[in-house]
Image (cartoon, rainbow, N blue to C red):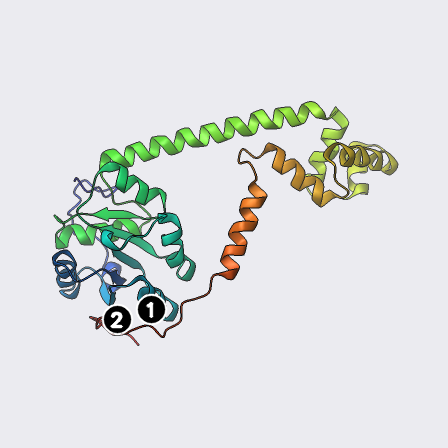
Amino acid sequence: MEQHDRGKADPGATSAPQAIDSCRIFLLSPNDIFAAALERMLVGGGSGRLVFCADDDQQCLDALARQEADILLINAKLLRYPLGSFFHRFHHLCPNLRIIVFGHEDHDAFVRNLVCSGCRGFINDEITRETLRAAFFAVMEGHLWVDRGLLTQIAVEEFEFQRMIEQRFKERIGLLNDELCLREADVFCLILEGLSTQEIADALHVSKQSVKAYLHRLFIKFGVSNRSQLIVSAFERVCPVDHLLDLLHETLNHSRTWKAPASTRRSARPRADRTD
């Protein structure tokens, strides 16, 4: 599988800044040949500092609760599905963590699923110390480390998705606009800007009582009783994602009830470079 480092003609180039050498690397993997090879590359220097190794995701979460990491290398054998929820557990503790998965299964559908779930890259068993360093540099710079063709495909799909969302927004805003008279639309736009009733009256050169009348009509049309409810109701109507508020509540409640892992698990494998 061709590895790609955006902005570099040679993926194996070693022009990454010295900051890469100080990157804190966590390794989540069972003891296999691939993981052992990666450990040798990392311990050998030049590709960050390996500060933690574990073969259990809970151990890794415990460690992240104690100290931050820059990059987390995960063996594909330990992935759990759905991937988005699995990666979220790590990002919840360390929001700036860059996750890279390594393994033998490198077909496009698998790697695309990784990237769409929050992973920053994928490396296969043909990795060398130089390409590992280049991969770290790419993800630390905010890029993806994936096959060039797949990267292009993802970029095209993202562009098309944005266009689709924009078009759906326009369609729903058009339907909303059809329900309002011109003056109601003017009042509603000024409400979105946070203007008070008097400020709206001054801006539209009408009386304060007229603005209150338009507000009352808007409340009736949207089935609400105050401005906050009006804004939320209008947003729900134009949002291309159905039941967005339910999804928001579910996500927030999940985040509140999620607890940081306890540090009472069995001890992990010895660290290559202890920092605590």
The kind of secondary structure element at disc 2 is loop
Q: Are marks 2 and 1 in contact (CB under 8 Å)?
A: yes
Q: Amino acid at mark 2?
A: Ala
**Image quarter for residue 89?**
bottom left
Q: Is residue 36 left or right of residue 21?
A: left
Q: Is residue 150 left or right of residue 36?
A: right
The kind of secondary structure element at disc 1 is helix
Q: Amino acid at mark 1?
A: Ala
Q: Nearer the viewer, residue 190 or 239?
A: 239
Q: Residue at x 77, y 27 (%)?
A: 183
What x and y, as percent, mark residue 127? 14, 50
Mark 2 and mark 1 lie on one chain; the one further toward the N terminus is 1
What x and y, as percent, mark residue 229? 70, 43
Q: Report the residue that reaches farthest toward the bottom.
A: 276
Q: Residue at x 56, y 41 (%)?
A: 244
What x and y, as percent, mark residue 156? 34, 30
Q: Nearer the viewer, residue 124 or 273?
A: 124
For the residues marked 2 and 1, what is the alpha-carbon distance in whole angstroms? 9 Å
Q: Residue at x 57, y 45 (%)?
A: 246
Name above or below for residue 138 compared with residue 155: below
**Image quarter for residue 148?**
top left
Q: Is residue 15 among what the camera can see?
A: no
Q: Is residue 106 left or right of residue 224?
A: left
Q: Which mark is residue 63?
A: 1
Q: Which mark is residue 268?
A: 2
In which quadrant of the rendered image does the N terminus lie? top left
**Image quarter for residue 270?**
bottom left
